[in-house]
Image: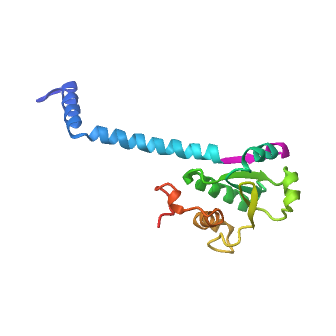
Amino acid sequence: MTSDYGDDDDIFDQLEKESEKDGFFDKYRQEKINQLNSIIRRNNNLSNYYSEVSTNDELIELMSKKIKFGNQLLIFINENFISCQLLVNLIKEIILKNNGLFNVIIVNALTVSFIVDKLKIKTLPSLVFYNNGQQINIKIGLNGLLDDPSDIKSLSEYKLNDYISKVFSLNKRDYDSDNDYSD
């Protein structure tokens, strides 16, 4: 197809030259690269700072590698409990936004009896916080983390993140700028 301006290839070439002059494609390309880098970084956060264990051996191996250093959060769950499922989903969202300030280990309380018995965990979910190998806090259940205490589905990502931050004394500015916690 041709027009007053020549064939389609000529028009496209002319459009491309004009776009190169104003830098539109460069700007668009850089925005896409930044967006993809952010996605990669977030996915790396999840793979680096989030683990699930379902046997005593897995937990012992993971704890021997990680628990002695930095901030660790062990979360004891029953996969069948809605409250535990909601908590795990929110924890994953927080980890995606986290810059490696703490590690999370999800522990299936039904199959990992060793530590459940040692810590005398009786209520699920339970959150146990460690710093450099020392237990610093334990949170039994979700009391205080719900927007509506009578509705388990009102578990608040903001309240959960705030609680974790206070326990680990994390500074909120260490989180990604694309999160929901900015002041």
Colouring rule applied to residues: rainbow
Relative image position of residue 156 (x, y in whole percent): 61, 66
Q: Is residue 53 magenta?
A: yes
Relative image position of residue 168 (x, y in whole percent): 64, 62
Q: Which residues are magenta?
A: 50-58
State the residue lying farthest toward the bottom.
149
Above or below residue 156? Residue 32 is: above
Q: Is residue 150 magenta?
A: no
> Residue at horizontal 61%, vertical 46%?
46
> Residue at horizontal 18%, vertical 30%?
14
| Residue 126 seen | no
> Residue at horizontal 79%, vertical 42%?
61
Judge left or right: residue 100 versus residue 177: right
Please name whichever residue, 134 or 60, is drawn nearer the observer in this view of the structure.
134
Above or below residue 79? Residue 155 is: below
Relative image position of residue 92 (x, y in whole percent): 62, 53
> Residue at horizontal 74%, vertical 44%?
65
